[in-house]
Amino acid sequence: MQSIPLFESQNLRLTPLEPEKDAPILASWSYDLETAYQLRQGQPARPMPAFEVRKVCEQWEKEAREDRQFLFAVHSKQSDAILGVIRICWMSWVNGAAYLDVLFNKSEDWQSIASEALNMALRYAFEELALFRVTAVVPGHDQAAADLYHQANFTLEVRQRQAIYWHSQNWDKLYFGMLRPEWKMQQAGVLA
Amino acid sequence: MTIQQFCGKQVRLAYMDLEADSAQWAKWRMDSELQRLADWGPANVYSQREMKRWIEEDSEKRYPFSIRTLENDQIIGFITLTGFNWTAREAWLGIVIGERGFWGHGYGSDAIQTLLRFAFEELNLNRVSLDVFEYNQRAIRCYEKLGFQHEGRRRQEIFIDDRRWDDLYMGILRVEWEDLQKKGK
């Protein structure tokens, strides 16, 4: 058994989400409509008050209790501030498949933080949950999110034409996927 | 009463009848091959009570119909629009023809044509999406004929019969559908 810690990286720590404490902070991020879109769970995006975000968090917790998703708050080791939320959700145990949803405060350095956290989430998905594949969905206008998955060596698998409406125009919805053998090969390369 | 809008050439789309349709759905679900063609989860057996709960759950967010033959009003399957994104004007289509005797005779295509007309002309959608497992070749050919375009595949998403299969994504845009109507397809 290897001893790489699952819940800790160089700068970050994965912890349980605490709806009471964290919901007001997540709510303050929801003026960013991409974040709001993730929190609104399919409804048209708008900024969300803390009490609504708290309900979403509690719904996530419920699904986590039923093993339908795995839910992590991402904290800075240095300041202990919450920087984002990572979910491994829509679990399909028979197919060994799930979706990955990352939600971050769009600070200046959010991409490097998200990338470090994503790596922990992938390790957890493949090495702890024994998944065969994960999917991440990105709106076509969100280049930073697409870059995040490209850089993590995901493959762009699906481009749903005009499935997103954003800033007065239609954009494609992108589906990225990573398979277990691809993750293992990447790890072998990293560790070699 | 037959409303033209919900009638195709061979079938009509009817709103769900909670008692009758839940019993029918529970019966069709005993066909495990049908479930493997249609469902992401493991095939299972379901009581009528469970199917009733499933029909009622979140029903206000979905647009489900039973598919009935024009000839004698026999119920042969179900078709649904779900997962609406009202700003992008998009929804997902799902269909199952439960009566095997009606496979391969155009009934499913007719139901889809009728639902697409409703989706584009009444709901003002811009696109309709679907996904289909790679082993469901009959359905893939049907969607292609109806004008759905291939938009990619989630590799090896499904594990069935000791091997992995892709999940294919297809979609049809409003302009594509309108072009097909002009050509009389």
Image: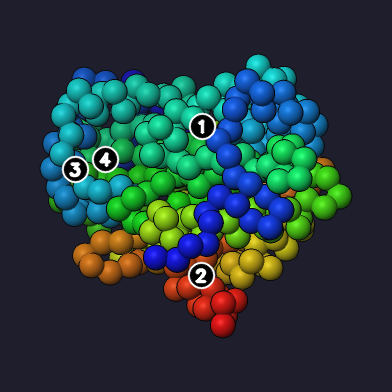
Residue name at image x 86 percent, y 50 percent: A108
Q: Amino acid at mark 4?
A: Gly
The x and y percentages for residue B60 are 46, 22
Residue name at image x 70 percent, y 20 percent: A50
Tag 4: Cα neighbours inside 10 Å, few (<14), some, or many (≥20)? Answer: many
Q: Amino acid at mark 2?
A: Trp
- Measured along the vertical axis of the image, is residue A98 above or below residue A36? below
Residue name at image x 64 percent, y 56 percent: A9
Q: What subunit carries mark 1?
A: A
User: For mark 3, what is the residue?
Assistant: B44
Q: Are marks 1 and 4 on the same chain?
A: no
Q: Are marks 2 and 4 on the same chain?
A: no
Q: Amino acid at mark 3?
A: Asn
| Distance (Cα) linking label 1 and label 4 | 34 Å
Q: Amino acid at mark 1?
A: Trp
User: For mark 1, what is the residue?
Assistant: A60
| Distance (Cα) linking label 2 and label 4 | 41 Å
Q: What subunit carries mark 3?
A: B
Residue name at image x 68 percent, y 57 percent: A10
| Residue A29 as seen in the image, left or right of residue B4 | right
User: For mark 4, what is the residue?
Assistant: B77
- Helix, strand or loop at mark 1: helix
| Distance (Cα) linking label 3 and label 4 | 18 Å
In this view, the mark in front (1 or 3): 1
User: For mark 2, what is the residue?
Assistant: A183
| Distance (Cα) linking label 2 and label 3 | 32 Å
Quarter that holds the N terminus of chain A: bottom left
